[in-house]
Amino acid sequence: MPIRTNVAGSHAGESQASAQTVLLLACGTGSRLAFEALYRDTSAKLFGICLYYLNNRAEAEEVLQETYTSVWLKASSFDPGLSSACTWLAAMARHKAIDRRRARLRHEPLDAVDQWPTQDTVLDTVERDCQGAAIERCLGTLEADLQRYIRVAFFEGYSYAELAERHSIPLGTMKSWIRRGLLRLRVCLGL
């Protein structure tokens, strides 16, 4: 019997998130049907994240496969009390894509970047779908520069050293600012 994830009604977004949680938990018990349904439901978003960070379709496909291999192997460690299934999956894809990008050692020189991206990224969209409203609200409580540093470090994958160099700020200062900003976000989010 196939597992369905599309649920009609006024709470379709919540139902989809709930269905993804159920599917991920079932994957943790070894359910291949749940894994197949989870893949169908989430692979397009995760592929978008991989493609965004790698800018290479073949590499993105490889990283997506690695991501789902890890999902299968680590699904039993998923805790719905800590994050939504969508956030957990998106974070795994993002981390693997960033690891791949760093491994190829072909960073774009910072001087070649005219300005930091201002439009929504794929990860922004996924996060907004999952838990974005609260994060956006809390980010809005931070100073504009601190918001930008956190967004670029965590949503665009730049390191603290790259940010410090780009803005001519000592590395230790950049790390301290971002750390303090993250602590304020944590308090705001009630974590």
Image: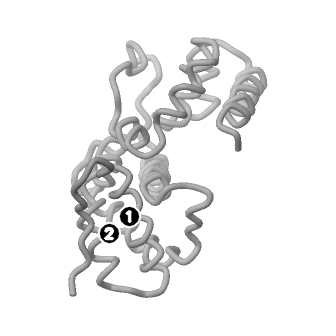
Question: Residue at point 64% right, 21% down?
Answer: 164
In this rendering, would 137 be left or right of 72? right
Q: Seen from this angle, which residue lies furthest front?
A: 10
Give the class, few, some or many, for how many residues have Cα within 10 Å of label 2's Cα (few <14, many ≥20). Answer: many
Quarter of the N terminus within the rendering: bottom left
Query: Element at badge 1?
Result: helix
The Cα atoms of the two marked residues, 1 and 2, are separated by 6 Å
Residue 121: x %, y % from top left: 35, 33
Question: Residue at point 41% right, 30% down?
Answer: 108
- The three-letter amino acid code for the residue at tag 2 is Leu
Query: Element at badge 2?
Result: helix
When the figure is inspected, residue 76 is found, relative to residue 115, above or below; the finding is below
Residue 28: x %, y % from top left: 49, 80
Question: Residue at point 50% right, 74% down?
Answer: 75
Q: Do the residues labelled 1 and 2 touch (CB within 8 Å)?
A: yes
Which residue is label 2 attached to? Answer: 38
